[in-house]
Image (tube, rainbow, N blue to C red):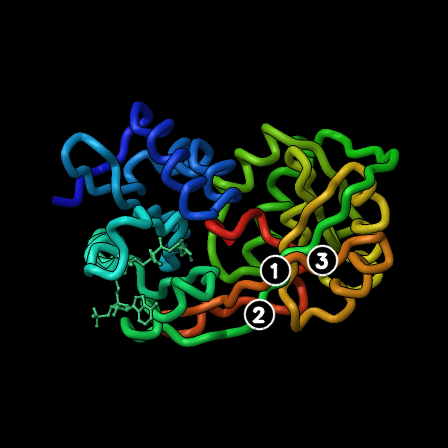
Amino acid sequence: MVQPLRAADVPAAIALLERVGLPSGAANLARYLRWQPAGAWGVVEHGALVGMVTLLQFGHVGFVGCMAVDPGRQARGLGRVLLEHAHAAGRRAGVITLLLEATPSGQRLYEKLGYVVDHETLIVSRSRVAPSDPVALDHERRAIFELDRGATGSPRDVMIGGLIDEGRGGVERTTVLAGYGLVVGDRLGPVIARDPGAGRALVDRLAGACTVAAVPAPNEPAMAAFAANGFGYTRSLRRMRLGPPVGSNPAWLWSLASSGAG
Ligand SMILES: CC(C)(COP(=O)(O)OP(=O)(O)OC[C@H]1O[C@@H](n2cnc3c(N)ncnc32)[C@H](O)[C@@H]1OP(=O)(O)O)[C@@H](O)C(=O)NCCC(=O)NCCS
């Protein structure tokens, strides 16, 4: 009963994500399908989409997003069926570790399937915008892919390349790239930096045009940088993992691309 979601299903899927209170999923779903056309599944009942999930594969890492079951159909096992379907598809394609950012309602389901909490992720936001000067980053593409891989332990070239094409941003570098940040719409992220000085400089330089970011709570310099730029707490998610650690470098992770993609 689980079937692939296609481009034509996007409007119904966005409506479902909005109904269950996942606005970031609604804003990003079309991107996820662009990056991985075969990475989204849904359940249709009587012609209506009542459940969905996405999975972005970054090498041995699979990132689960957009887990949603229509409020009238929740707590009847549909979420588990969808998630297990995504797990099986990912494992067939070589995924070893699954990651996700859990809402409180999702966390219970994920714990039942064996996920553990790695850390908290804070969604921070602000209402005002100020001048900032993001630039095109096409010429830094290769160095950005390499730095991103060092930070996350996984090859995210397709996603990061797509965000470079779509957005603007900034880099900090000496002879090597010390950090990069991307502004996509009203969001600042990902921001990846090898050292606190580079991360702070990127947030200070790019935050002006942005109103939202998702920041790993253990990264104290990142939390301080966003607070200094007027961002305040909105809500928290839990980064959860099923499988061995992926070899990421948490101190380099300053903000996420989105909660459905990491
Ligand atoms: C999270 C969500 C997708 C789960 O879908 P669902 O169809 O309700 O979940 P299931 O019925 O498959 O539940 C799976 C398991 O979790 C348990 N569970 C689900 N909700 C629970 C709750 N509120 N309290 C305790 N256990 C719960 C069920 O008992 C079930 O366990 P079992 O299979 O051992 O019986 C759905 O609640 C939802 O759309 N929530 C709003 C959007 C959201 O927050 N998504 C998560 C984003 S990370």
Which of these two is toward me, 112 or 245? 112
How packed mark 1 is, by other alpha carbons closer than 10 Å (few <14, some 14-19, many 20 or more), is few
Mark 1 vs 3, N-terminal side = 3
Q: Quadrant of ligand 1?
A: bottom left
Q: Which numbered circle lies on residue 235?
A: 1
Mark 2 residue CB less than 8 A from any atom of ligand 1: no
Taking the image as shown, residue 233 lies to the left or right of residue 151, namely: right
Q: Which numbered circle lies on residue 193?
A: 3
Task: Tell me where residue 117 appears, x and y as whole percent.
Answer: 46, 75
Taking the image as shown, residue 139 lies to the left or right of residue 72, namely: right
Q: Which residue is mark 2?
A: 120
* 1 vs 3, front mark: 1
Amino acid type, callout 3: Ala
* 3 vs 2, front mark: 2
Residue at (29%, 74%) from the top-left corner?
112
Q: Are marks 2 and 1 in contact (CB under 8 Å)?
A: no
Amino acid type, callout 2: Glu
Residue 49, image quadrant:
top left
Distance CA(mark 1)–CA(mark 3): 24 Å
Q: Are marks 3 and 2 in contact (CB under 8 Å)?
A: no
Identify the image quadrant of the N terminus.
top left
Mark 2 vs 1, N-terminal side = 2
Task: Find numbered disc 1 in the image and state the secondary structure of the residue it sits on.
Answer: strand
Taking the image as shown, residue 229 lies to the left or right of residue 181, namely: right
Mark 3 vs 2, N-terminal side = 2
Which of these two is toward me, 202 or 52? 52
* 2 vs 1, front mark: 1
Amino acid type, callout 1: Arg
